[in-house]
Amino acid sequence: MSCLRLVVFAAVIGLVRAGELSNPGFEEAQDGKPTGWTIRDEGTSLVTGQGSEGEYCLRIVDPGPKAGSDVTSAKFAVQENQLCVLRLKLFLESGDRQGLGVYLKLWNAAGKELVEPREQSAVRPRMEEGQWVDATAIYQIPEGVTQAAIWFHTFSTATVTCRVDDLRLELTASEADRQAGDWRGGELVALPEGGTAVRWTHLRSPALTETFDPPADWSQEGMLRFRLRSDEATGAGFMLILDSEN
């Protein structure tokens, strides 16, 4: 066992400064397609009167494992080690509640797309059938990356029909490399009852990580216990990832 990561996908509601994302509400259209966006599948379309706000929204239809969806925004400038915070609204008509993947495509200064970090960036926001929900995806910009784009792609096993609207993008400073004791991505704080804990703010760091050097042998262990506290109940999903060498 070489690495322990804690990851939270949070639905945070609030106003943010507009980023450089082109046509984030899909209100600009030409020939029935949203300007600033590229659609490479037959199931995605621009629809009217069904959005969260405004006249238009994006409707994604993936009827089965052989179809899929492929929708990409225009590129926007980023800086390495920034955080890219994307807020969006989602409406599930039918199918898999986590069938839509929200990725961040990445390019370096030479214009080469970086496939591996793109695949690692996938976020699967939880949707609710018959209602609009707020979702948040947070990405760490890797070193050497100068441009990025939002990419909607349904998973190969998914069957889903959903709508997307009202995207908001913010680029902000990252604390992903901040050290807190043995953990990276948080800050060390004192507890009122004594002792210390690590405070992790998801909007500043996409993950809280501890790496064991040398790797720890957990093969004889059967349970992991830890204390967790949040100042506010947001209903966010919590994911614990154990990276193993075998």
Image: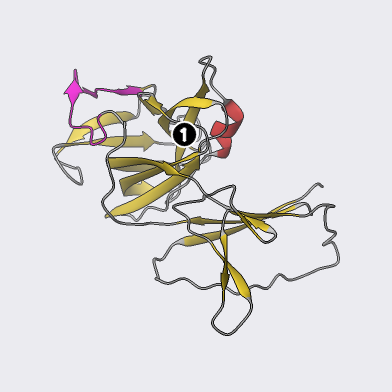
Q: Secondary structure at mark 1?
A: strand
Q: Is residue 40 left or right of residue 176?
A: left
Q: Is 195 included in the stretch rendered in magenta?
A: no
For residue 217, which quarter of the picture? bottom right
Secondary structure that dominates the magenta span: loop
Q: Position of residue 99 (x, y in %)?
A: 45, 44
Q: Give the colour scheme of this rendering.
A: secondary structure
Quadrant of the rendering where the N terminus is positioned = bottom right
Identify the residue at image location x=46%, y=34%.
104
Identify the residue at image location x=33%, y=40%.
169
Q: Residue furthest bottom?
A: 193
Q: Is residue 66 left or right of residue 77?
A: right
Identify the residue at image location x=40%, y=71%.
233
Q: Position of residue 218 (x, y in %)?
A: 82, 62
Q: Position of residue 45 (x, y in %)?
A: 27, 29
224 vs 106: above or below = below
Identify the residue at image location x=47%, y=51%.
204
Q: Answer few, some or many: residues within 10 Å of disc 1's Cα (few below 14, many 20 plus, some between 14 and 19).
A: many
Q: Is 32 included in the stretch rendered in magenta?
A: yes
Q: What residue span does the magenta drawing correspond to?
A: 23-38
To which residue does mark 1 refer?
104
Q: Is residue 246 left or right of residue 50?
A: right
121 vs 11: above or below = above
142 vs 135: above or below = above
- 194 vs 161, nearest the viewer: 194
- 196 vs 200, nearest the viewer: 196
Q: Position of residue 187 (x, y in %)?
A: 56, 61
- 234 vs 76, nearest the viewer: 76
- Amino acid type at circle 1 is Leu
